[in-house]
Image (spheres, rainbow, N blue to C red):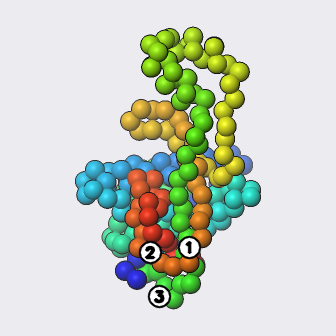
Amino acid sequence: MERLYYLDVLLKYDHDIPCNFLLSKFMYAIHVTCALSVKLTGMSNIGVAFLDYDKEEARLGNKLRLFSFSEEVLKKIPQVKQFKNLEDYVLYGSVALVPKFVNEFVQYRRVQCKFNKEKLIRRYAQRHNEDLNFVRIRYKDLQSKNLSLPYVNLSSSTSGEHFRLYIDQIENMEYIPPVFNSYGLISSGALPKF
């Protein structure tokens, strides 16, 4: 197994600041950091695991584990601007090497909903050169389909559009070195589960 490091993260939520709100802000910070890494190096250098993931309850939880092949990348996370803004709501553990003897492996993958009402309306308006509000009125009774998977609400840093990032957890039988996407999720490979 390659030298893979991890950093445990706990989001401190309460009745004034819900867990999903903090998780969305934290995942946005992960996305911005990973996207910058992709732009500079051609690859994302941070992966994320959700330690309290529950598919039945559609919950990601407030305990995360960040992974990287670089110890320095994880040590710098609390000082990165996007994470610094959350410092009152986040507790970080210490960076450590992944234990050598791990028998369970997992993937956290993005799942995209095939049917999104707003996306279809925008696409129709653009393709048929029609007014967006007119198309919205025409298709007001069209129902969006949502997945039953856990998700985080994010907004695109390029277009400003809001969307749900659905996340599925898939158990793996073996370790395959992970490749992370710009959301810190798995493109290929698997993460140790411990």
**Which numbered disc, 2 or 3, marks the residue closer to the eye?**
2
**Residue shown at 74% from the left, 58% from the top:** 56
Callout 1: helix, strand or loop? strand
Q: Position of residue 58 (x, y in %)?
A: 70, 54
Mark 1 or mark 3: which comes first in sequence? 3
Characterize the local packing of mark 2: few (<14), some (14-19) or many (20 or more) Cα atoms within 10 angstroms.
some
- Examine the rendering and report whether any part of residue 124 can be seen: yes
Are the two marked residues, 1 and 2, in contact with CB atoms closer than 8 angstroms? yes
What amino acid does circle 2 point to?
Ile
Report which residue position mark 3 lands on: 100
Q: Circle 1 is placed at which residue position?
A: 172
Q: Give the quarter of the figure containing the C terminus.
A: bottom right
Name the residue at 58% across, 54% down: 167
What residue sits 65% from the left and 52% below the top? 150
**Quadrant where the image shows the N terminus:** bottom left
Which three-letter amino acid code belongs to the residue tagged 3? Answer: Lys
**Mark 3: secondary structure:** loop
Kindly identify which residue carries mark 2: 176
